Image (spheres, rainbow, N blue to C red):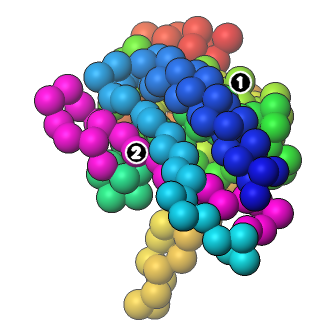
Amino acid sequence: LAEAKSLNTQRVSAAKKLDSEINQVLEELGMQDATFRTQVLFPENPKIESASPTGLDIVEFYVTPNLGEGEGPLNKTLSGGELSRVMLAIKKVLAHRDHVPTLVFDEVDAGISGEVGHSIGSCLKSLAKHHQILCISHLHQVACQGDSHYEVKKSSDDGRTFSFIKELSLMERPKEIARMLGGSENKQALEHAENLLK
């Protein structure tokens, strides 16, 4: 029981640091009005038989997504895009401690554009120093920061739909980025795409 209480004290202290770091990254990711909070509860009447190697704490994550909205549990409060960005922030903060080799982000950039898109791309690139990142994106600011770029296409044949994936060459990437910019492969769009890739 004494060890469980000691672990609780350490967790409460670590939670404050974790929350501060996650909130800082959320601001960079365009969620400046969001607040992330870790709740660490120790039972009022702890039963020693309930103890385990992980202690007796009940740990839950809470978030206030926007100014003026109430706080709620992480898994019930956010939209899909918001949840993806919160998970990206958590993964960035814990990157040096997390030993999961591959992370998959499915449209982490949903519903955003501009400078926030660039911030998300930079965050993913930073995370790639510690993990292999697979990111599904429709945003050129994110796609241009990847080390590799794959194009996924669907086609129908004989009443069935098939998906195909192809790694784009260095010559093909600017064309795809230009397409993501607005669908045009004119000279200006291609120059802009090449500059983004640099």
Question: Viewed as shown, does residue 75 lie left or right of 103?
Answer: left
Element at badge 2?
strand
Question: Viewed as shown, does residue 176 lie left or right of 182?
Answer: right
Q: Is residue 132 visible?
A: no
Magenta span: chief secondary structure: loop
Q: Amino acid at mark 1?
A: Ser
Element at badge 1?
helix
The C terminus - image quarter: top right
Residue ID for mark 1: 126
Q: For residue 57: magenta? A: yes
Q: Position of residue 178 (x, y in %)?
A: 47, 26
Q: 4 or 163, which is in the foreground?
A: 4
Q: Position of residue 45 (x, y in %)?
A: 54, 64
Q: Residues within 10 Å of mark 1 (few under 14, many from 20)?
A: few
Question: Viewed as shown, does residue 35 lie left or right of 21?
Answer: left
Question: Sequence order check: which comes first, mark 1 or mark 2?
Answer: 2
Q: Amino acid at mark 2?
A: Tyr
Residue ID for mark 2: 62
**Residue numbers of the magenta segment:** 51-72
Q: Which mark is residue 145?
A: none
